[in-house]
Amino acid sequence: MIEDKETYLDIIQNGNLVGVSPTQMLLHGPTKRLLDKYHWHSPNKGIVASYSPTDRDVEDHFNVFRGVDQVEAFAQASVVSCATFLECRKLNCTPAELKDLFIPAFISIGSVNFHNYLELGDTFISIGNITFYKWRQMVCDGRVYKVPKDLDLDVYFSDFTEERLLKYDISKDFTLVAELFGITGRAIKIELFKKTE
Amino acid sequence: MERQEILDGLIEVLRTIRTIDPDRLVGVTEETDFLTDLSTPSTELINIAAKVENKFDIEFDDDDIDHMGSKVKDVIDLIIMVKARGEKE
Protein backbone atom coordinates (compact mmCIF):
# COMPACT_ATOMS: atom_id res chain seq x y z
CA MET A 1 0.00 0.00 0.00
CA ILE A 2 1.22 3.50 -0.79
CA GLU A 3 1.01 5.41 2.44
CA ASP A 4 1.69 9.02 1.49
CA LYS A 5 0.07 11.21 -1.14
CA GLU A 6 3.34 12.60 -2.50
CA THR A 7 4.62 9.14 -3.40
CA TYR A 8 1.31 8.26 -5.02
CA LEU A 9 1.27 11.46 -7.10
CA ASP A 10 4.83 10.78 -8.25
CA ILE A 11 3.76 7.31 -9.42
CA ILE A 12 0.74 8.78 -11.19
CA GLN A 13 2.79 11.45 -12.95
CA ASN A 14 5.89 9.44 -13.77
CA GLY A 15 5.17 5.77 -13.33
CA ASN A 16 2.54 3.13 -13.90
CA LEU A 17 0.21 0.85 -11.97
CA VAL A 18 2.61 -2.04 -11.40
CA GLY A 19 3.08 -2.22 -7.64
CA VAL A 20 -0.07 -0.23 -6.91
CA SER A 21 -2.80 -2.11 -5.09
CA PRO A 22 -6.12 -2.21 -6.99
CA THR A 23 -7.76 -1.29 -3.68
CA GLN A 24 -6.13 2.13 -4.07
CA MET A 25 -7.23 2.53 -7.70
CA LEU A 26 -10.73 1.05 -7.79
CA LEU A 27 -12.88 2.78 -5.27
CA HIS A 28 -15.83 0.45 -4.97
CA GLY A 29 -15.85 -2.02 -2.10
CA PRO A 30 -14.20 -5.43 -1.91
CA THR A 31 -17.27 -7.52 -2.73
CA LYS A 32 -17.50 -5.92 -6.18
CA ARG A 33 -13.77 -5.78 -6.90
CA LEU A 34 -12.69 -8.45 -9.39
CA LEU A 35 -9.03 -7.53 -9.62
CA ASP A 36 -6.07 -8.70 -7.54
CA LYS A 37 -2.91 -7.33 -9.09
CA TYR A 38 -1.45 -5.26 -11.91
CA HIS A 39 1.46 -6.97 -13.70
CA TRP A 40 2.20 -4.66 -16.63
CA HIS A 41 0.94 -1.19 -17.55
CA SER A 42 1.75 1.35 -20.20
CA PRO A 43 -0.49 4.33 -19.39
CA ASN A 44 -1.46 5.23 -22.95
CA LYS A 45 -1.40 1.74 -24.44
CA GLY A 46 -2.80 -0.89 -22.12
CA ILE A 47 -2.53 -3.18 -19.15
CA VAL A 48 -2.19 -6.74 -17.87
CA ALA A 49 -3.89 -7.57 -14.56
CA SER A 50 -4.97 -10.74 -12.79
CA TYR A 51 -7.75 -12.10 -10.62
CA SER A 52 -8.50 -15.42 -8.91
CA PRO A 53 -12.24 -16.02 -8.41
CA THR A 54 -13.31 -16.56 -4.81
CA ASP A 55 -15.88 -18.90 -3.25
CA ARG A 56 -18.32 -16.03 -3.22
CA ASP A 57 -17.81 -15.39 -6.95
CA VAL A 58 -18.79 -18.92 -7.95
CA GLU A 59 -21.43 -19.55 -5.28
CA ASP A 60 -24.67 -20.96 -6.74
CA HIS A 61 -23.02 -21.19 -10.15
CA PHE A 62 -21.47 -24.68 -10.39
CA ASN A 63 -18.10 -23.36 -9.10
CA VAL A 64 -17.79 -21.56 -12.44
CA PHE A 65 -16.95 -17.86 -12.71
CA ARG A 66 -19.76 -16.24 -14.68
CA GLY A 67 -19.15 -14.80 -18.14
CA VAL A 68 -20.73 -11.53 -17.12
CA ASP A 69 -18.23 -11.30 -14.28
CA GLN A 70 -15.39 -11.90 -16.73
CA VAL A 71 -16.57 -8.85 -18.64
CA GLU A 72 -16.78 -6.82 -15.42
CA ALA A 73 -13.34 -8.03 -14.35
CA PHE A 74 -11.91 -7.08 -17.74
CA ALA A 75 -13.55 -3.64 -17.54
CA GLN A 76 -12.16 -3.03 -14.04
CA ALA A 77 -8.68 -4.07 -15.15
CA SER A 78 -8.75 -2.05 -18.37
CA VAL A 79 -11.02 0.96 -18.84
CA VAL A 80 -11.65 1.71 -15.16
CA SER A 81 -8.03 1.35 -14.00
CA CYS A 82 -6.42 2.94 -17.06
CA ALA A 83 -8.84 5.86 -17.39
CA THR A 84 -8.74 6.57 -13.66
CA PHE A 85 -4.95 6.61 -13.82
CA LEU A 86 -4.89 9.03 -16.79
CA GLU A 87 -7.51 11.34 -15.29
CA CYS A 88 -5.56 11.45 -12.02
CA ARG A 89 -2.44 12.27 -14.03
CA LYS A 90 -4.29 15.08 -15.82
CA LEU A 91 -5.69 16.59 -12.62
CA ASN A 92 -2.65 15.68 -10.49
CA CYS A 93 -4.78 14.01 -7.85
CA THR A 94 -5.29 10.60 -6.29
CA PRO A 95 -8.21 8.26 -7.11
CA ALA A 96 -9.69 9.00 -3.68
CA GLU A 97 -9.85 12.69 -4.60
CA LEU A 98 -11.29 11.87 -8.02
CA LYS A 99 -14.13 10.07 -6.27
CA ASP A 100 -15.52 13.42 -5.15
CA LEU A 101 -15.76 14.64 -8.76
CA PHE A 102 -16.72 11.74 -11.01
CA ILE A 103 -18.66 8.49 -11.19
CA PRO A 104 -16.92 5.82 -13.27
CA ALA A 105 -19.63 4.43 -15.54
CA PHE A 106 -19.57 1.28 -17.67
CA ILE A 107 -21.45 2.51 -20.73
CA SER A 108 -21.06 0.08 -23.59
CA ILE A 109 -19.93 -3.36 -24.73
CA GLY A 110 -19.18 -3.97 -28.39
CA SER A 111 -19.02 -7.77 -28.47
CA VAL A 112 -17.64 -10.70 -26.50
CA ASN A 113 -16.69 -14.16 -27.70
CA PHE A 114 -16.23 -16.84 -25.07
CA HIS A 115 -13.89 -19.74 -25.82
CA ASN A 116 -13.49 -21.40 -22.44
CA TYR A 117 -14.51 -21.09 -18.80
CA LEU A 118 -12.93 -20.35 -15.42
CA GLU A 119 -13.42 -22.30 -12.19
CA LEU A 120 -12.71 -21.76 -8.54
CA GLY A 121 -8.96 -22.25 -8.13
CA ASP A 122 -8.09 -20.73 -11.50
CA THR A 123 -6.27 -17.46 -11.98
CA PHE A 124 -6.87 -15.39 -15.09
CA ILE A 125 -5.34 -12.33 -16.68
CA SER A 126 -7.05 -9.54 -18.54
CA ILE A 127 -4.95 -8.05 -21.33
CA GLY A 128 -6.46 -4.68 -22.23
CA ASN A 129 -5.50 -2.60 -25.26
CA ILE A 130 -6.63 1.04 -25.23
CA THR A 131 -8.17 1.86 -28.61
CA PHE A 132 -9.65 5.28 -27.77
CA TYR A 133 -9.31 7.80 -24.97
CA LYS A 134 -10.68 11.28 -25.10
CA TRP A 135 -13.02 13.46 -23.06
CA ARG A 136 -12.86 11.00 -20.14
CA GLN A 137 -14.20 8.17 -22.29
CA MET A 138 -12.06 5.10 -22.86
CA VAL A 139 -12.54 2.13 -25.16
CA CYS A 140 -10.54 -1.09 -24.79
CA ASP A 141 -10.32 -4.33 -26.71
CA GLY A 142 -8.63 -7.32 -25.19
CA ARG A 143 -8.56 -10.87 -24.09
CA VAL A 144 -8.97 -12.96 -20.95
CA TYR A 145 -6.60 -15.93 -20.50
CA LYS A 146 -6.42 -18.65 -17.88
CA VAL A 147 -2.97 -18.65 -16.31
CA PRO A 148 -0.84 -21.82 -16.19
CA LYS A 149 -0.60 -23.22 -12.66
CA ASP A 150 2.22 -21.85 -10.50
CA LEU A 151 3.36 -19.25 -13.03
CA ASP A 152 4.83 -16.10 -11.46
CA LEU A 153 2.99 -13.41 -13.42
CA ASP A 154 5.17 -10.57 -12.14
CA VAL A 155 8.28 -12.29 -13.48
CA TYR A 156 6.58 -13.38 -16.71
CA PHE A 157 5.39 -9.88 -17.62
CA SER A 158 8.46 -8.01 -16.36
CA ASP A 159 9.80 -7.65 -19.91
CA PHE A 160 6.44 -7.37 -21.69
CA THR A 161 6.19 -4.68 -24.38
CA GLU A 162 3.57 -2.62 -26.22
CA GLU A 163 4.33 -4.58 -29.39
CA ARG A 164 3.66 -7.88 -27.62
CA LEU A 165 0.47 -6.45 -26.10
CA LEU A 166 -0.92 -5.62 -29.54
CA LYS A 167 -0.18 -9.14 -30.80
CA TYR A 168 -1.26 -10.92 -27.58
CA ASP A 169 2.18 -12.43 -27.74
CA ILE A 170 2.19 -14.71 -24.69
CA SER A 171 3.05 -18.36 -24.11
CA LYS A 172 0.77 -21.02 -25.57
CA ASP A 173 0.48 -22.35 -22.02
CA PHE A 174 -2.07 -19.60 -21.35
CA THR A 175 -5.60 -20.67 -22.31
CA LEU A 176 -7.74 -18.21 -24.23
CA VAL A 177 -11.02 -17.73 -22.36
CA ALA A 178 -12.61 -14.68 -23.97
CA GLU A 179 -12.10 -12.00 -26.58
CA LEU A 180 -13.68 -8.61 -25.85
CA PHE A 181 -14.27 -5.69 -28.16
CA GLY A 182 -15.43 -2.14 -27.58
CA ILE A 183 -15.52 -2.20 -23.79
CA THR A 184 -16.32 1.41 -23.02
CA GLY A 185 -16.28 3.43 -19.83
CA ARG A 186 -16.71 7.10 -19.07
CA ALA A 187 -16.07 9.24 -16.02
CA ILE A 188 -19.25 11.24 -15.56
CA LYS A 189 -19.31 14.38 -13.45
CA ILE A 190 -21.21 13.71 -10.25
CA GLU A 191 -23.58 16.65 -10.77
CA LEU A 192 -24.51 15.40 -14.25
CA PHE A 193 -24.90 11.82 -13.02
CA LYS A 194 -27.30 12.91 -10.29
CA LYS A 195 -29.38 14.86 -12.81
CA THR A 196 -30.42 11.57 -14.38
CA GLU A 197 -31.71 10.17 -11.08
CA MET B 1 -19.32 30.48 -40.71
CA GLU B 2 -23.06 30.27 -41.38
CA ARG B 3 -25.22 27.66 -39.65
CA GLN B 4 -26.22 26.11 -42.99
CA GLU B 5 -22.56 25.70 -43.93
CA ILE B 6 -21.92 23.98 -40.59
CA LEU B 7 -24.98 21.77 -41.06
CA ASP B 8 -23.73 20.70 -44.50
CA GLY B 9 -20.31 19.91 -43.05
CA LEU B 10 -21.87 18.01 -40.18
CA ILE B 11 -23.93 15.88 -42.56
CA GLU B 12 -20.71 15.05 -44.43
CA VAL B 13 -19.28 13.85 -41.12
CA LEU B 14 -22.40 11.80 -40.38
CA ARG B 15 -22.09 10.04 -43.75
CA THR B 16 -18.82 8.54 -42.47
CA ILE B 17 -20.39 7.12 -39.29
CA ARG B 18 -20.91 3.39 -39.76
CA THR B 19 -23.84 3.13 -37.35
CA ILE B 20 -25.93 5.82 -39.06
CA ASP B 21 -28.13 4.70 -41.94
CA PRO B 22 -27.34 7.10 -44.84
CA ASP B 23 -31.01 7.02 -45.87
CA ARG B 24 -31.90 8.72 -42.58
CA LEU B 25 -29.65 11.67 -43.43
CA VAL B 26 -32.04 12.84 -46.14
CA GLY B 27 -33.98 15.74 -44.67
CA VAL B 28 -31.82 16.21 -41.57
CA THR B 29 -32.57 19.55 -39.89
CA GLU B 30 -31.29 21.32 -36.81
CA GLU B 31 -34.13 19.68 -34.84
CA THR B 32 -33.02 16.18 -35.77
CA ASP B 33 -32.05 14.17 -32.68
CA PHE B 34 -29.12 11.79 -33.02
CA LEU B 35 -30.51 9.32 -30.52
CA THR B 36 -34.20 9.24 -31.36
CA ASP B 37 -34.29 10.22 -35.05
CA LEU B 38 -31.06 8.71 -36.34
CA SER B 39 -30.90 5.81 -33.83
CA THR B 40 -27.29 6.64 -33.12
CA PRO B 41 -25.82 4.71 -30.16
CA SER B 42 -25.03 7.22 -27.40
CA THR B 43 -21.39 6.10 -27.34
CA GLU B 44 -21.13 7.07 -31.02
CA LEU B 45 -21.62 10.75 -30.12
CA ILE B 46 -18.01 10.77 -28.94
CA ASN B 47 -16.82 9.47 -32.32
CA ILE B 48 -18.94 12.10 -34.06
CA ALA B 49 -17.41 14.79 -31.84
CA ALA B 50 -13.90 13.55 -32.67
CA LYS B 51 -14.64 13.72 -36.40
CA VAL B 52 -16.27 17.14 -36.02
CA GLU B 53 -13.04 18.41 -34.42
CA ASN B 54 -11.08 17.37 -37.50
CA LYS B 55 -13.66 18.62 -39.97
CA PHE B 56 -13.99 22.08 -38.45
CA ASP B 57 -10.43 22.40 -37.11
CA ILE B 58 -11.55 22.99 -33.53
CA GLU B 59 -10.81 21.41 -30.16
CA PHE B 60 -13.49 20.48 -27.63
CA ASP B 61 -12.81 20.50 -23.90
CA ASP B 62 -14.04 17.77 -21.55
CA ASP B 63 -16.73 20.16 -20.31
CA ASP B 64 -17.94 20.89 -23.86
CA ILE B 65 -18.64 17.20 -24.37
CA ASP B 66 -20.24 16.84 -20.92
CA HIS B 67 -22.83 19.42 -21.83
CA MET B 68 -23.36 18.56 -25.50
CA GLY B 69 -27.00 17.82 -26.29
CA SER B 70 -28.21 15.15 -28.67
CA LYS B 71 -29.79 17.37 -31.33
CA VAL B 72 -28.07 18.59 -34.48
CA LYS B 73 -28.60 22.18 -33.37
CA ASP B 74 -26.76 21.45 -30.11
CA VAL B 75 -23.70 20.35 -32.05
CA ILE B 76 -23.92 23.38 -34.35
CA ASP B 77 -24.18 25.70 -31.32
CA LEU B 78 -21.17 23.98 -29.79
CA ILE B 79 -19.10 24.33 -32.97
CA ILE B 80 -19.93 28.06 -33.16
CA MET B 81 -19.11 28.55 -29.47
CA VAL B 82 -15.80 26.69 -29.67
CA LYS B 83 -14.79 28.51 -32.87
CA ALA B 84 -15.53 31.85 -31.19
CA ARG B 85 -13.53 30.77 -28.14
CA GLY B 86 -10.61 29.85 -30.41
CA GLU B 87 -10.68 33.23 -32.12
CA LYS B 88 -10.50 35.01 -28.74
CA GLU B 89 -7.44 33.02 -27.62
Image (tube, coloured by chain):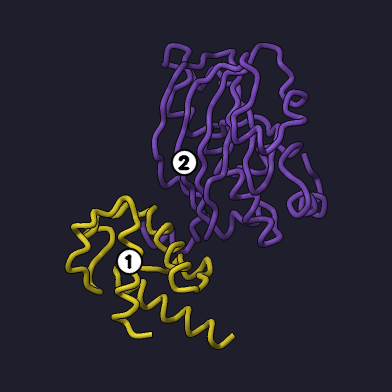
Chain colours: A purple, B yellow
Residues at marks 2 and 1 touching, judged by CB atoms closer than 8 Å: no
The image position of residue B74, as x and y in percent, is 34, 73
Instruction: Report, in whole angstroms, how far the alpha carbon at label 2 lies from the one at label 1.
Output: 27 Å
Q: Is residue A47 above or below residue B85?
A: above
Discs 2 and 1 carry the same chain letter = no
Q: Looking at the rendering, in which quadrant would you find the N terminus of chain B? A: bottom left
Comparing A63 with A10, the one in front is A10
Say which amino acid is labelled 1. Glu
The percent position of residue A5, horizontal first and vertical second, equals: 78, 53
Tag 2: Cα neighbours inside 10 Å, few (<14), some, or many (≥20)? Answer: many
Q: Which residue in the protein does label 1 denote?
A: B12
Q: Residue at x 61, y 50 (%)?
A: A84
Q: Nearer the viewer, residue A41 or A54?
A: A41
Indicate the secondary structure of the residue bearing disc 2.
strand
Chain ID at mark 1: B
Residue B14: image location, x then y, percent: 32, 62
Q: In the rendered view, does A107 fall on the left or right side of A132?
A: left
Q: Residue at x 50, y 46 (%)?
A: A139
Out of A42 and A172, give the one closest to the viewer: A172
Q: Residue at x 77, y 39 (%)?
A: A1
The C terminus of chain B - image quarter:
bottom right
Chain for numbered disc 2: A
**Residue depth check, mark 2 versus mark 1: number of the one nearer the observer:** 1
Q: Amino acid at mark 2?
A: Ile
